[in-house]
Amino acid sequence: MSTLVKNIVRFMLFIGVQVFILNQIPPLHQFVVPYLYFLYILWLPFSLGRFPLMLIAFFFGLSFDYFTGTTGLHAAACVMIAYIRPFLLSLLIPKESTEQSYVEPSISSMGWAPYSLYAGLLTFIHHFYLVLLEWLQFGNFVYFLGKVAATTGVSLMLIFVTEMLFSRKAKFRTNK
Amino acid sequence: MKNIFLFIRQYINFISFLLLQVVSVILLTTSSKTHETFFAEASNAVTGNLNSRYSTLRSYFTLRETNRLLAEENARLRNQLSGNFQAPDSSRIQAKDSTVRDTLGRFRKYSFLPARVIGNTYTLQNNYLMLERGALQGVHKGMAVTGPSGIVGVVVESTDNISKVMSLLHRNSKVSAMLKKDNTAGSIEWDGADPSYLTLKNVTKSAKVTKGDTVLTSTYSSNFPSHLMIGTVAGITADPSSNFYTLKIKTATNFFTLQFVNVIENVRYSEQTQLENSGKHP
C-alpha cells in the first residue's frame, strides 16, 4: 500500500475511532476525555514539509470538529502540534540516518526512549493548547490543570496500547 | 519590497502557522455564536448522516434498556387510567346489629360478597383465578366462589386485598354435587382435558340420569350453599367394574369470560370443618 493511500485510510480510521468509539465512552470524570485521534499527525511521514503537514493537520482537526460541533477547537490544537513536530523530530533523532532510511516515526524507527518523549511532549502540547482554548471560553484554573494532566495520562496510555496492538513494521525507504 | 518577500519566504511556515491558528480561533468563536459558517450546512449533512447511521446501529445494543423504559412508562400511564380505581365497597356494611336473629328465629348462614376477577387461567392443568378482594374485605381461605351463571371455585389463599381462587378447572378441585332431579349426590372433578366439561363421579347407578339433567351443589358441602348451578349432563359413562356412573358435565360458568364473581361466606364454615376434621383425625 502506498504511503498516500495508507494515510488516507488512517485519516478516516482515526476520526471514526475517535468519534464513534472513544467519544461514546461514558464520562468517567469531567477531567478524563480519551483522545487518540491526534496520533494520526504523529504518524505522518518524515518526508512531508512543514506547510503541508500543517494543512493536513488543519483539515484533520476540522473534520473531527464537525463531528463534535466545536468548529476550530481541535483544528487549532492539531496545527499546533504539526508546527512543533519537525523541531522535536530534528532534536530527537539523528537526522541523516533515520529520515533517509525510514518512512514515518515509530518505535522501531526511532527507538523506545525518543519515541516516548516525542509522543509524550506532543500529547502534552496538544492537550495543553486544547484545554487552554476551552478554558478561555469557560472554566476555572483547577479544571485547566486537572484536565491537562488527566487527559495527557489517558492519551499516552491509549497511544502505547495502540503502538503495541498495531506494531507498524519499520518501513525502509526505497527509491521508488 | 524585495526584503518583504524575502521575509515572507523565510518565515512562510511560521506565518502559515499563525494564519491557520487565527482561522481556527475565528471559526471557534464564530461557530459557537452563530451556526452559519459558510460550509457548516454541507459538513453537517455529512456528519449528520454518519451520526444517524451510527446511532441506528447503536440503538440495537440499547434495545433492552429502551424496552424496560417503555414498559415502565406504559405501567405508569396505565396506573393513571380511571378503570384502575375501585369505588369503595358499599355492598356490605359492617354494623353491629343487636337483633342477631329475625323474628321468625332464622339466622343468616351465607353472605355474598362481590369481587372483580383480575386474573384467570384456563389453559393449564391447575388453574387459578385472582380476585380483587382480600382478607381486609372479608375473604378467607375456604370460601366458595360463584359466578353469574354457575359456581367457579374455592378460595385457597387471601392476602390483604387480593385472593387466590382454585378454579373448578384444577386437578385437585373437588366439589360435592347432586342431580337436581332426584338429589343423587356425587362429586365434581376435572380431568384436565377440556375447560368446558367437568366430571361428576360417584353417582350411583340407581339414579335415572339422562342427558341434559341439571347438576347443582349438594347440601353436604361445607362452603357452597346448596342448589347452586354447576352445569348440565352432557355424557353418561357407566363404569362396568363399579356401581357408579361417571358423568360428563357441561359447565354453566363460562370460564373464558369471567369478569365479576361472588364470594360466599358461610358463617358456620369453621365450626363445620372443625367438627368434620375432628371426626377424621381424633
Image (cartoon, coloured by chain):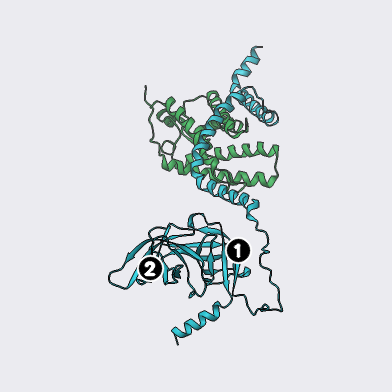
Chain colours: A green, B cyan
Quadrant where the image shows the N terminus of chain B? top right
Residue A7, image quadrant = top left
What residue sits 71% from the left and 76% below the top? B97
Query: At numbered mark 1, what does the secondary structure look like: helix, strand or loop?
Result: strand
Of the numbered discs 2 and 1, the one sitting upstream in the chain is 1
Q: Amino acid at mark 1?
A: Pro
In this rendering, position of residue B171 left or right of residue B55: left
- State the image coordinates of residue B44 (x, y, percent, origin top left): 59, 28
- State the image coordinates of residue A78 (x, y, percent, origin top left): 57, 32
User: Is A55 rendered above or below residue A105?
Assistant: above
Query: At numbered mark 2, what does the secondary structure look like: helix, strand or loop?
Result: loop
In this rendering, position of residue A125 left or right of residue B219: right
Residue B141, image quadrant = bottom right
Q: Mark 2 — on which chain does it sit?
A: B
Q: Nearer the viewer, residue B242 or A103?
A: B242
Q: Which residue is mark 2?
A: B208
Q: Which residue is mark 1?
A: B114
Number of the label disc, if any, that sits on residue B266: none
* Distance from Cα at disc 2 to Cα at disc 1: 37 Å
- State the image coordinates of residue A13 (x, y, percent, origin top left): 47, 33
In this rendering, position of residue B260 left or right of residue B183: right
Q: Nearer the viewer, residue A134 or B233?
A: B233
What residue sits 57% from the left and 43% below the top? A33
